[in-house]
Image (tube, rainbow, N blue to C red):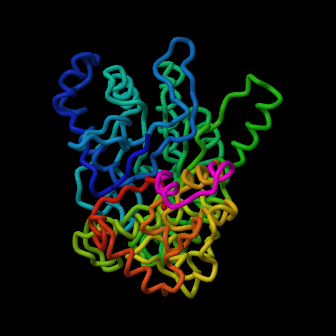
Amino acid sequence: MIFGLFPNKIRIYSIKKELILIFGIFPTTMNYERIKEKLEILADAAKYDVSCASSGSTRKNKNKGLGNSSGMGICHSYTEDGRCVSLLKILLTNHCIFDCAYCVTRKSNDIKRAAFKVQEVVDLTIHFYRRNYIEGLFLSSGIFKNADYTMERLVQVAKKLREEENFNGYIHLKSIPGASDELMREAGLYADRLSVNIEIPTKKGLKLLAPDKDRKDFINPMRKVKEEIIQYKIEKKKYKSTPIYAPAGQSTQMIVGASGESDMEIMYTATYFYKKFDLKRVYYSGYVPISYDHRLPQIGSEVPMLRENRLYQTDWLLRFYGFNIQEILNPIHPHLDTDIDPKLSWALRNLHLFPIDVNFADKELLARVPGVGMRSVHKILQARRHQKLRVDDLKKMGVAWNRTQYFITASTSLIGKDFTAAQIKSSILGNSNSKYQNTYNAQLSLFNQTS
């Protein structure tokens, strides 16, 4: 089960009471207050990274080890009071040699610093897991000394968990930009998923806000992981004993709203990375205004959550609904409509394609009808083999009839024949009961079935 990921709304897992119990079974040499302070600092610093879903990994328990990573995936799950019940999500350290304007851990920021030792992360993971507080580990880090020095320690954590603790649960490691190919190869042998955040969607934005960073340092780890995944799959066909390599693939994250890119620039970048590096997911994180910098937009305390949600909806349409990016965003339409979702926006711009007859239209066109999700498309295709579908049949299948009615015919039903795009949009918005309508600060579910 996947839940929404909201970097600004997340409340860190309440650990104070649990730590008293957990440290009761820790080695006596461990200092409770010291570890507790580190955990509070480095868990809070990790909350801005949302690229942490683990869908796609299957790692079975072996040799009577600890845990397993099931095929349905592990990801952030939050109870109503904000407690994390899934992953131990922390930074190895929030010390960093870079001074990126948008980052809370940048070296010039006046914050409390901390760093875990490798063994401390291993012990925390195992003991939290044994107490059933987590199902796996999401480990990122600020960059200290250099990229290889940092990446080597991330790999050491995963290696110790796998080889010394026989831990078979989910592990997600952040790839450090600029890390060597050798370390990236080793990381994929122990982690289920790897991710390197490209952070800012465009080169010009990165140069403006993080002039010390080079975009190629983000690209090279992605390239290496892709190559290794392909190579290990080839070897696996020949030799069954070949170990699995990053079975959940790789992902990345882009900050939205920090450097002035249009929705078109953001989604064109995402599309490029999907195709170029076979990414499992691209995550879009609304810019969090953490401090003043003349290079950053001054947006008060607001975070572009609605825009973030529209980007996720567009991403969903590209990956599962057969849309081409140029159909949704192009120089004529460089921005997503905040009033309505991207599928409805596209349909209103292409009324000449509608209405379609649900009893005869092909799968691709059915998937483009506003209010019809992919599950409903499959139901329609199955049901119309046996009967002629009518409005009541479609409603029972779960289509959002308040939207769908303007774009389809079912038997003799046709409502939107003489309506203009403006009239249809006005009618749909007028009948909408969504509490999120025109609300930028609301938490929106990113993973509901896109309509």
Q: State the residue lying farthest toward the top.
A: 64
In front here: 49 or 158? 49
Is residue 384 part of the magenta span, yes or no?
Answer: yes
Q: Give how far across and how far down residue 226 sits, in percent.
A: 68, 49
Residue range in magenta is 383-398
Viewer-closest of 203 and 351: 351
Quadrant of the rendered image containing residue 355 = bottom right
Residue located 20% across and 42% down the image:
81
Q: How many marks?
A: 0
Residue 204 covered by magenta stretch: no
The spot of residue 383 in percent (x, y) is 62, 49
Residue plotted at (65% across, 47% down): 225
Between residue 426 and residue 250, name the one nearer to us.
Answer: 426
Question: Is residue 175 depicted above or below 342 in this figure?
Answer: above
Instruction: State the image coordinates of residue 127 (x, y, percent, origin top left).
Output: 33, 22
Residue 10 vertical position relative to residue 233 in the rendered view, above or below? below
Query: Most extreme residue toward the front, as rendered?
Result: 412
**On the picture, is 392 further left or further right than 37?**
right
Question: In the figure, residue 231 lies in which quadrant?
Answer: top right
Comparing 29 with 133, the one in front is 133
Q: Is residue 310 above or below residue 349?
A: above
Quadrant in the picture for the N terminus: top left
Q: Residue at x 52, y 66 (%)?
A: 314
The residue shown at (30%, 44%) is: 42
Please, which residue is most extreme toward the right here?
238
Q: Position of residue 240 (x, y in %)?
A: 76, 24
Q: Quadrant of residue 19?
A: top left
